[in-house]
Image (spheres, grey):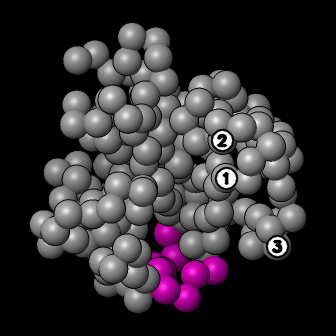
Amino acid sequence: MNIAVRPASVYEDVRTLVGPKSPGANVCWCLSYRIPAKLNKELRGPARGEYVAELCRAEPPPGVIAYEGGEPVGWAAAAPRSVTSFARSRSIPHVDDLPVWSLWCIRVRLGHRGKGVSHALIAGAVAFARDRGAPAIEAYPLDSGGDTVDLTMAYAGIRKNFERAGFSHAADTTSVLAGHPRVLMRLDLRG
């Protein structure tokens, strides 16, 4: 399988992966952790997509996209933690004062799962953050202990996938998602 991972600067591809089937629908668009809660509640329907279109034109773009044969098949959200709601989180601790990046959402399209796309997305997000000078990147995956995870709630990722990518457990959190605790995993990008 030939998977290429590139910065998410093509709005139509981001829309394919995280946008609604109906343009007026209110879906996350992967904005819930990216923008302040008040703005997240105010942006409705097409305004959410317009906001994401602006993010795609900005530097850095809102994350990375995995492509297979030119088709967008996966998404990972990544940004400096300082510009996300994780910067103010009471349930996800700060390990230190490094200006780390956060990787908080991984999504693989139906029909493309089980082919290594999520692994490619994690590696691509790491490279994306490293290329933009991040000293470290964090993720907040589920620690399912090998139990099955509801796929709609698996967007945070699974601990073992981050361990495979070289991330280390940096801290426990008080966050729970789909009945599973989340842990703070970190990969140092210096050196």
Q: Which one is earlier in the sequence, the residue at label 1 or at label 2?
A: 2
Can residue 31 be seen here? The reply is yes
Front position in the image: 82 or 42: 42
User: Residues under labels 1 and 2: Cα distance?
Assistant: 6 Å
Identified by mark 3, the residue type is Lys
Assess whether residue 113 is covered by the magenta stretch: no
Q: Are marks 1 and 2 in contact (CB under 8 Å)?
A: yes
The quarter holding residue 4 reads top left
Disc 2 crowd rating (10 Å Cα; few below 14, some 14-19, many 20+) is: some
Tell me the residue at 49%/32% (across/down). Answer: 65
User: Residues under labels 2 and 3: Cα distance?
Assistant: 21 Å
Place of residue 29 in the rendered image (x, y in percent of width and height, measured from the top left): 65, 49
165 relative to 101 in the view: left or right: left
Q: In terms of secondary structure, where does tag 2 sit?
A: loop
Q: Which residues are magenta?
A: 88-98
User: Residues under labels 1 and 3: Cα distance?
Assistant: 16 Å
- What label sits on residue 20 in the rendered view? 2
Identified by mark 2, the residue type is Pro
Disc 3 crowd rating (10 Å Cα; few below 14, some 14-19, many 20+) is: few
Can residue 135 be seen here? The reply is no
Which residue is the site of mark 3? 38
16 relative to 169 in the view: left or right: right
Front position in the image: 9 or 12: 12
Assess whether residue 92 is covered by the magenta stretch: yes
Q: Is residue 63 above or below residue 166?
A: above
103 relative to 168 in the view: left or right: right
Which residue is the site of mark 1? 27
Count every numbered label the image shows and give the total: 3
Tell me the residue at 64%/71% (across/down). Answer: 85
Q: Which one is earlier in the sequence, the residue at label 2 or at label 3?
A: 2
Image depth: mark 1 or mark 3 in front: 1
Q: Which one is earlier in the sequence, the residue at label 1 or at label 3?
A: 1
